[in-house]
Amino acid sequence: MAKKQFKAESKRLLDIMINSIYTHKEIFLRELISNASDAIDKMYYRSLTEKISGVSKKDFYIKIVADKGNRTLTISDNGIGMTKDELEENLGTIAKSGSLGFLDGRNAALGEDADKDAKKAAAKAEKNIDIIGQFGVGFYSAFMVSSEVRVVSRAYGAEEAYEWESKGADGYSIRPADKAEVGTDVFLAIKPNAEGENYDEYLSPWKIRELVKRYSDYIRYPIKMDREESVPDEAGGDAQKTKTVISEETLNSMVPLWKRAKSRIKDEDYHEFYKEKFHDYEDPLKVIHTSVEGVVSYDALLYIPGRAPYNYYTRDYEKGLQLYSSGVLIMDKCAELLPDYFSFIRGLVDSQDLSLNISREMLQHDRQLKAIEQRIEKKIKSELEDMLAKDRESYEKFWEAFGLQLKYGIYDGFGRNKDVLQDLIMFYSSKEKKLVTLGEYAANMPEDQKYIYYAVGESTEKIDKLPQTELLKDKGYEILYCTDDVDEFALKVIMSYREKEFRSVSGGDLGIEESEAEKKKAEKQAEENKDLLAAMKDALGDKVTDVRLSKRLKTHPVVLVSGDGLSLEMEKLLNAMPAADGGVKAERILEINANHAVLSALKKAYERDKDSVGAYAGLLYDQALLMEGLSIEDPVAFAGAVCALIEKAEATA
């Protein structure tokens, strides 16, 4: 029989579809199974709307047969089948979708002008079908792995069957064929292996099972395949003798867990699904199962893991939810469905309403996608707030694993997401000796406290010993301990919480009001020591911007604080970055405890020998640097100065 040319514009169009549209060749099996499922759905729809007797949903199936010897793979279904004209129209015209045409007809049956009984039957059938195909190009993905494709089909109600055959872009032929049952068989002649291409795997039962499980596990009809097993042959009494037994197995689950009624799902079901699908050995901390109907309808099954993956805080980690369309896996990691700060969420979204590209491998960026992302974001936040309020132990376990990500989320975009995240973040409390939220801190603030105070350091133990915290602790003010690099950056972009500004204990001004008596005393001390302080400032030169008496120290002699701009901790962090040249400098202020014996000693030394103050100023400055965890410019000189001071003290004893 003479070959016919495809009705599409050119041979190049089919070549593009075979070689360019699909990223992964293995997608072909997903597409052919989806076509088979659509054919069965059409038959089932017709049986309901036309009241065809003898047709039961449980009798439908899809069968896969791999023949390694002949290098053929067959995908069969007992759906509605195709007539000769339908083979011509659907397979002879590239990008002509029979499923899309069916959907148009179904929509007409549900329209305002439809017959009432027909409309009622169509509405009933509508709940039981789920047409997947839209573009009519999925079938041609078979040519990515096949040198020849044959389709033998017999339509429901037809007496004859027909065979469509093609070797690719050079055309196709249609001829009568023998087929006793209604339905369609697609025969693929699998290509021989080529350099860099292993086509043998598509004939492997193991690979087929894996692809079905991955892409088509939730096709609503059973996908069957014969399984060969060697078992002991006990008939002859020889334990060494075996025989081959062939049994039919169903490869897919059919009903997705997320489509079941929540009341019928146990926690164990959710947890087992999570561990199997997302390769974790621990149960998740929380399960979020939600169904949304409206302009954009979708089902989502989301999990908050109990621990962070080993590569979570690295560039290698890839965020995203599995995306399904009508139970068929479209993308394994759809990053667009999750904001970065919730990238720890694992799970899936199943929707018919998203616009997919022609290969159904990628999303078109549209309003539906954005709407789903926004709803998922709100749902995750709501569930985290619920966990925080009702299951503190689990939330703190979550925080230990993923709290850093939420703080990065606040800093990212310079506070753009702070309203979403600020009620979820936690810090160690100086007063409570445990993690607290900003809301809990604010609720416990004394009436006279104007600011939310924080301190930065390597650990809570080291922060707890900082001289800068003495006055605040003495007043009973709570301090948030920041031990992660991003903490201060995050608080800086939040700026204030419930109209209370954040202030560092190491900042230039703590903002604590003084009584009139305290003000007068401080002014008097400053006046009495102004020459000494000026001499110390001159001796230190550009190392500091000021030397002054401290209002924050109680027992310690000296402390180094920053001005109102860059903090000392930020200076350390920025200079530690790979591209840094060490040129970042915070404004440094040396504060002396006015009530400490060291000030009295300095005054005596200044009165006795004004030049000696420079050496003492250098010692105190280096001491303050050490307490801040900053490097001393000349450790040898510092050691020498300490020794000289000891020798002088011994000589005058």
Image: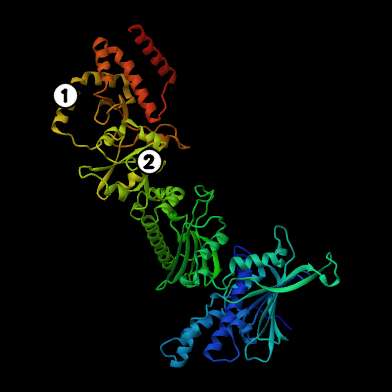
Q: Which mark is residue 524?
A: 1
Q: Please state the horizontal and vertical placement of residue 208, each as a whole percent of the image.
A: 67, 67
Q: Distance between the Cα atoms at labels 1 and 2?
A: 36 Å
Q: Which residue is mark 2?
A: 482
| The one of 372 and 555 positioned closer to us in this rendering | 555
Work out whether 377 lies above or below 325.
above
Q: Which mark is residue 307?
A: none
How many numbered circles does the render carry?
2
Which of the 4 image quarters holds residue 379? bottom left
Quadrant (top left, top right, bottom left, bottom right) of the C terminus: top left
Q: Please state the horizontal and vertical placement of residue 10, each as a whole percent of the image.
A: 62, 73
Q: Amino acid at mark 1?
A: Lys
Q: Please state the horizontal and vertical placement of residue 233, each as a whole percent of the image.
A: 81, 70
Q: Amino acid at mark 2?
A: Cys
Quadrant (top left, top right, bottom left, bottom right) of the N terminus: bottom right
Residue at position x 27%, y 40% in the image:
477
Label pair 1/2, CB-CB below 8 angstroms? no
Label 2 secondary element? strand
Q: Can the viewer see residue 115 in this picture?
A: no
| The one of 302 and 1 positioned closer to us in this rendering | 302
Colour scheme of this structure image? rainbow
Dot 2 crowding, Cα within 10 Å, few <14, some 14–19, many 20+: many
Q: Can the viewer see residue 114 in this picture?
A: yes
| The one of 407 and 278 positioned closer to us in this rendering | 278
Q: Please state the horizontal and vertical placement of residue 72, each as a whole percent of the image.
A: 73, 72
Residue at position x 74%, y 62% in the image:
193
Work out whether 74 lies above or below 615.
below
Label 1 secondary element? helix
Dot 1 crowding, Cα within 10 Å, few <14, some 14–19, many 20+: few
In the figure, is residue 122 to the left or right of 595?
right
